[in-house]
Image: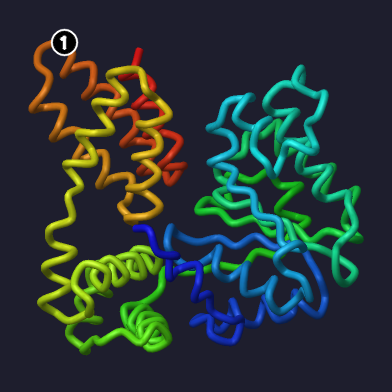
Amino acid sequence: MDAPLWIESHLPTVEELPQQQVRDALTLAVDEPMNLILAGPQGAGKTAAVRALAQKAHNDPENDLIELNIDDVFSRTKTEIKNDPRFAPFLVGRSRLSKRDMINHVIKESAGYAPVSGTYKTILLDNAESIREDFQQALRRVMEQYYRTTQFVIATRQPSKLIAPIRSRCFTVPVRAPSHDEIVTALVRVLDAEGVDYNDEGVEYVAGYAGGDLRRAMLGAQTTYEDTGEVTMSAAYEALGTIKLTDATEEMLTAAEDGEFSDARKTLDELLIEEGYSGAEVLTDLLAVARSRYSGRKLASFHRLAGEVDMNLTEGTSDRLHLSRLLAEIGR
């Protein structure tokens, strides 16, 4: 998908967020900056809610909202972290640090510099269920040190994974999965803004296809429009019913077998982020492709690894992290 993603270019305002308790909490956090935990399932709109908060709270949200996807950062190598243009200025001459210390240093430096506009800035730590306990202890100290100028917002599917000292320093905001009608409303808002031809049946089909995942709904609608030029029932069925997941999965598995881990993970990111597939869907397709390629001990070993990944996915931990581990094991 080469065009800008609608899920990012048509962010809702705080007033347009569908859940009253989320609107109330974020409005309060603008007037009285506080650390927040946004707790809810994948695709519930947690990241979009934080971006809406930043738009309302900061005169220069592009600079005063700092987003760190914990899942993405911790799954990188030290070299990848050091070379990331967002982090490079903080890590000059610090290549001897451990990966954990590198990430901690980046967050501490990000929290330490003055906001560009206003009196405080916002740091979003997304997919925070991936944070190890030792790193959480370091994070707690940063939160204590910079509480006057930095608002931390922690988005997670599993707030129970956070240590008690962090939970006690944050106001928890439950974000439930959006209802079917709420997804329909969000889709109509974006389709109208884009000037897309659609009918009610097409929007209903896309909302049902998403299964309570707002991001998946937006990606599905955009895929349908880019493939067919409209979002009708027949167009959505044609576009979303024929997405070539298996082709991408075979490409990803081949790259992993050849030791091209970066290429394999790039395809994985496309499936999870751009196409909106869940980790469970990708794992199911990987198993189907593996059964057509492997046999005997090799297939049994793949099933064992897949079983471990499936358990971790069921527990709600990072889809990308655990599927990346599976791809890395294949390369070995």
Against 19, residue 75 (above or below) is: above
Judging depth in this view, the residue of 38 and 112 nearest the camera is 112
Q: Give residue 151's quadrant in the image.
A: bottom right
Quarter of the figure with the N terminus = bottom left
Judging depth in this view, the residue of 314 and 125 nearest the camera is 125
| Relative horizontal placement of residue 133, taking residue 105 as reference (left or right) | left
Judging depth in this view, the residue of 143 and 244 nearest the camera is 244
Q: Give residue 92's quadrant in the image.
A: top right
Against 162, residue 251 (above or below) is: above
| Relative horizontal placement of residue 242, taking residue 270 as reference (left or right) | left
Q: Which residue is mark 1?
A: 297
Residue 210 on image: x %, y %: 28, 66
Residue 301 on image: x %, y %: 23, 16
Residue 319 on image: x %, y %: 41, 42
Q: Residue at x 32, y 55 (%)?
A: 275
Q: Residue at x 22, y 89 (%)?
A: 200
Q: Give residue 226's quadrant in the image.
A: bottom left
Against 224, residue 164 (above or below) is: above
Name the residue type under label 1: Arg
